[in-house]
Amino acid sequence: MAELSVRSVLVTGANRGIGLGLVQHFLRMPKPPQWIFAGCRDPKGQRAQELQNLASKHPNIIIIPLEVANPASIKAAAAKVGEHLGGSGLNLLINNAGILKVNTLDAETLEDMREIFTTNTIGPLLMGQAFLPLLKKAAQGSPGSGLSCSRAAIINLSSQGGSISSLLTWEIAQAPSYRCSKAALNMLSKCQSLAYKEHGILCVALHPGWVQTDMGRSLGLPPPVTLDDSVSPAHVSHGASHIPFRFLLLPSSSTSSSP
Ligand code: NDP
């Protein structure tokens, strides 16, 4: 299996949790990407401090203001990334930003359903649309014809919580809005994979494990997977080898339950 070798990557929600862990992982690679675009909705805020510190030491990290629930912000981010890349394309788009609200089915509301769908499902849809020209450019500029993360790919951070066949954490958290948003994200990933395959773009949905992040801890039990373990490379199928995650969601499922 070929090693992951990307010239450019964009991670949404890169200021904390798995997103920040991914940025750190890319920096540690033997051959780090030339461009690591770190999407962050409040780059000057307290929660972006660690990312800012990292970016001040690594000139290949470019912080991009990006609110994935706002189409105008997504368009502006695509334009900014395009400017930085000059004539070349974007190899890897990681739709990581996400939110979870631990409601019960009885207490679920229109507002929460809308907010969580907008961020977790519609955000990745609009991101895919806005960055398609740059992803296509990367695919066209890469040698070979196979699908791979080194060439051009969209990775959607899904969750086993969205799995219809293995609802392991129902007793801990019903969270219908989150589960529905991730189940829909899985279908979006399938649609993207079918539509973008002809452009040479690999599209997959991944479950990162139940990880020790703010979201992972919000279920009230200690998550079993460390951040480092989650973002370290895994040998997975479907041409997505060496992508920095231990768990592949589609079509198989993982062993640890999660948000
Ligand atoms: P965290 O809550 O720790 O971090 C979420 C990140 O997403 C933050 O950077 C946050 O930014 C950002 N974000 C949230 N909403 C938006 C938005 N509208 N626009 C831009 N950025 C946004 O979550 P994790 O790191 O744990 O989770 C990352 C992904 O992995 C999510 O998609 C989650 O569903 C998925 N996942 C996580 C699991 C876990 O156990 N942790 C398990 C299964 C899936 P800000 O700081 O501004 O809020």
Image (spheres, rainbow, N blue to C red):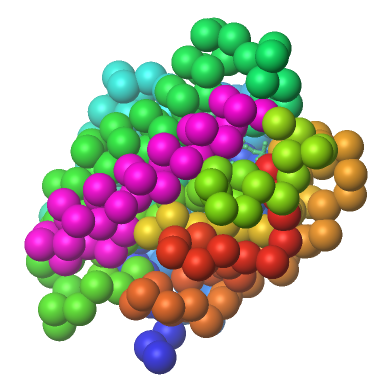
Q: Is residue 198 magenta?
A: yes
Q: Is residue 210 left or right of residue 242?
A: right
Identify the magenta region: 175-203
As drawn, the residue found furthest toward the right would be 221
Relative to 87, say whether 117 is above or below.
above
As drawn, the residue found furthest toward the bottom would be 1
Instruction: Name the quadrant of the C terminus.
Output: top right
Please give the name of the residue rendered at 25% of the width and 57% of the height, measured from the top-left corner. Answer: 193
Dominant SS of magenta comes to helix
How many numbered callouts? Answer: 0
Could you say which quadrant of the image residue 66 lies in? top left
As drawn, the residue found furthest toward the front would be 165
Could you say where residue 111 lies in the image, as x and y percent from the top left?
Answer: 54, 8
Please give the name of the residue rendered at 49% of the width and 33% of the height, measured from the top-left corner. Answer: 181
Q: Is residue 196 left or right of residue 119?
A: left
Q: Is residue 182 magenta?
A: yes
Could you say where residue 10 lies in the image, as x and y percent from the top left?
Answer: 41, 50
* One can see residue 89 in this view: no
Could you say which quadrant of the image residue 87 lies in? bottom left
Please give the name of the residue rendered at 12% of the width and 60% of the height, measured from the top-left corner. Answer: 199
Q: Is residue 45 left or right of residue 135?
A: right
Could you say where residue 170 lies in the image, as x and y percent from the top left?
Answer: 73, 39
Quick one: 98 or 162, which is closer to the camera?
162
Quick one: 79 or 118, which is closer to the camera?
118
Could you say where residue 186 lies in the image, as x and y percent from the top left?
Answer: 41, 47
* One can see residue 221 in this view: yes
Ligand 1 located in image quadrant: top right
Relative to 259, say whether 227 is above or below.
below
